[in-house]
Amino acid sequence: SQKIEQNSEALNIQEGKTATLTCNYTNYSPAYLQWYRQDPGRGPVFLLLIRENEKEKRKERLKVTFDTTLKQSLFHITASQPADSATYLCALDPASGGSYIPTFGRGTSLIVHP
Amino acid sequence: EAGVAQSPRYKIIEKRQSVAFWCNPISGHATLYWYQQILGQGPKLLIQFQNNGVVDDSQLPKDRFSAERLKGVDSTLKIQPAKLEDSAVYLCASSLDSPDEQYFGPGTRLTVT
């Protein structure tokens, strides 16, 4: 069956360190993968989109990698800050009959300690 | 630019009652999504519209849920009759096209008692 796996346990790190979050998937062939941030009581906010033919994408302190062989994406936040504390969701956009149907993982909670 | 608007923000109903949610996407966005997010889980796509046509509704419980997007702009999601397991946050999102970055509304928190 198709599955998207993100660590269910919260990731606790110290301010200034690099946070690395993992998104693994099985039985999907996504053309696109996206990362979102979600704060309590709010809707998700888009961070980055990476295509299957891209290995890496960066935006300010954020970096995403996409390995279609390992079926894995890594999301890095460098020089993390307490304000980065939130839940981070990965979403796949596998093509289906010519359309792209987004599918989200359950998210990983990141807690950055001052 | 104005974001995605949703109403109401909160709703409490008894089981077997009906409820409707409204979404106004960002102007010019062709694609509109409705998601259900249960506490501790990621958003689950219920239905995706491209303009006023349905792209995917494979996870929409069609015996009780319905959605429409008239004139390719605003959308409503209805539940009739509601069950206890429908308690969740219902999120609306829109994007210029698909796939593309999605802009989410604040959601409607539904509690079914």
Image (spheres, helix red, strand yellow):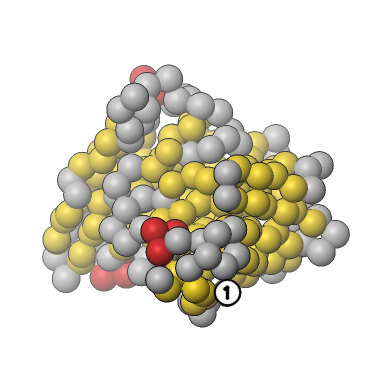
Picture quarter with the C terminus of chain A: bottom left
Q: Would residue A2 appear left or right of A37 to someone viewing this image?
A: right
Mark 1, secondary structure of its residue: loop
Residue B75, quarter of picture: top left
Residue A98 percent across, percent down from the top left = 70, 35
Residue at screen point 29% across, 49% down:
B107
Look at the picture and state if A41 lies above or below B104.
below
Depth order, front residue of A32/B54? A32
Give the crowd class for mark 1: few <14, some 14-19, many >=20 residues within 10 Å.
Answer: some
At 57% from the left and 67% from the top, the residue drawn is A17
Residue indicated by mark 1: A7
| Residue A57 visible in the shown view | yes
In this rendering, is residue A38 above or below A5?
Answer: above
Left or right for A112, reference B5 = right
Residue A103 lies in what quarter of the image? bottom right
Residue A105: percent from left, percent from top: 55, 62
Rendering coords of residue B55 (x, y %): 55, 36
Please state, as top left, top right, bottom left or bottom right, where the N terminus of chain A lies in the image. Answer: bottom right
Q: Is residue A61 left or right of residue B37?
A: right
Q: Nearer the viewer, residue B1 or B12?
A: B1
Look at label 1 and name its amino acid: Asn
Q: Which chain's residue wears label 1? A: A
Q: Nearer the viewer, residue A10 or B101?
A: A10
Residue at 69% x, 44% y is A57
